[in-house]
Image (cartoon, rainbow, N blue to C red):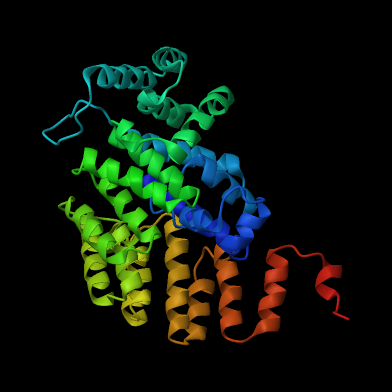
Amino acid sequence: MSDTLAVLRARLKAAHLASGELSTREISRRVHGAVSHTTAHQVLRAATLPSWRALEPVVDALGADPEDFKKLWMQARSEEKGGRSVIAKDNTYREDLRPHLAGAFNLFRHYCRIEKFEEAKAFLISQIDPPSNSKIDLVVELYDRFYYQDQKIFAKYDPVIQDFTESGDATDVESAHSAHSLARRCLEQSNPQRALVFAQRAHAINPHVFGFVAIHAEALIALGLYEQAEAVATTAHELDPKPTYFFYSPLADVLRMKGDYKRLEELAKQSYENAGGPSGNEPSTYARCLLQCGKPEKAISVINAALEHDQGKWTRAELLVTAAKAYCQQSSFSDAKAALQGDELFASEKMLQLEFANVLAREGLWEEAARLLERLHEVPTEVSASKPD
């Protein structure tokens, strides 16, 4: 998982908090159903990099600037796809593609790496047109690389991919990446049955890469098949000798749903330690996991240890918000407010001020919380002063 994805996730959390923590159904309503409420939930979690077609409307609904997020998304996408090649750089199995398809992928990706984008498009289009199910891997490769910046490619090939996701034969898909992309699209469209078909295909083509196995678990979770999902998610987890970012994994989702908090805590701690402990990237997510396990005191200890290390602005703010939630879980509202207000970021960071208002609300100080929220959300004076009939 890329470092930029972690930044993107933190920015999404900040935007969601700044929106007043809109419900996912309200997000879907505000964008007239461009994303479902379940897709909005997946985007906000950002366990994996969401597609731009799902991320953009969610960001827009939250009142944030899509262009700011697009820069982050493109960087995260570049990190995610960096070095992805049909020809392995080590002894790890990739996938068994026909030489013609492998060659087309590699030449296309070479052109993209050296930023000959027009040559890349022209070459792959020459291999695709006219589109057919037997060329779906090439269509997905071209579409995934350019749909968010080339309207002609989007308009021409989006219907082809949509038709294939609805009625295509998954055995026509040869690339695990293509099958994964199609499964992800189905999940974003709240079509878990078809997602499972493509996710199983991705897993079958290449059972040695975490993402291709994890998408299978995600589809099973979406269908409520938790026992099967746990087995597949465990297989995915065990593919990495030093797993990190466990909090966002399908296995963590299954364990939460089953209420297996002991195993959830054990694996979250392992992930936290693998990522560098208090100086690494996971103190906040480990602390949030501890809160879910009913251990706020332990969560506060983890956060305090992390705050002793140099942290970026977004990471520090996220840690402080999590600390406030932990104190509130203990009904220690004064400590929650002190944790937020006592930090030098408080005066300039709206995310912390919003969480301070939320603490006031949890404490039952509704009028005080409302006044602060009205100021932070810039509610006009005449609206805030009006009384119901």
Residue 81 in the image: x percent, y percent?
34, 34
Residue 163 in the image: x percent, y percent?
49, 34
Horizontal side of residue 275 vs 304, given as left or right: left
**Quarter the C terminus occupies:** bottom right
**In the foreground, 149 or 35:** 35
| Residue at 23% over, 56% down | 232
| Residue at 34% over, 41% down | 180
**In the foreground, 73 or 152:** 152
Horizontal side of residue 324 vs 99, given as left or right: right
Which residue is situated farthest in the left direction here?
A: 91
**In the foreground, 18 or 46:** 46
Residue 268 in the image: x percent, y percent?
26, 66
Is residue 348 in sight in this rendering?
A: no
Give the mark count.
Answer: 0
Residue 185 in the image: x percent, y percent?
45, 43
Which residue is situated farthest in the right direction here?
A: 389
- In the rendered image, the vertical position of residue 274 relative to residue 84, given as above or below: below
- In the rendered image, the vertical position of residue 75 relative to residue 368, given as above or below: above
Is residue 9 in sight in this rendering?
A: yes
* Residue 114, picture quadrant: top left
- In the rendered image, the vertical position of residue 122 relative to residue 93, given as above or below: above
| Residue at 63% over, 51% down | 33
Horizontal side of residue 313 vs 152, given as left or right: left
Horizontal side of residue 245 vs 123, given as left or right: left
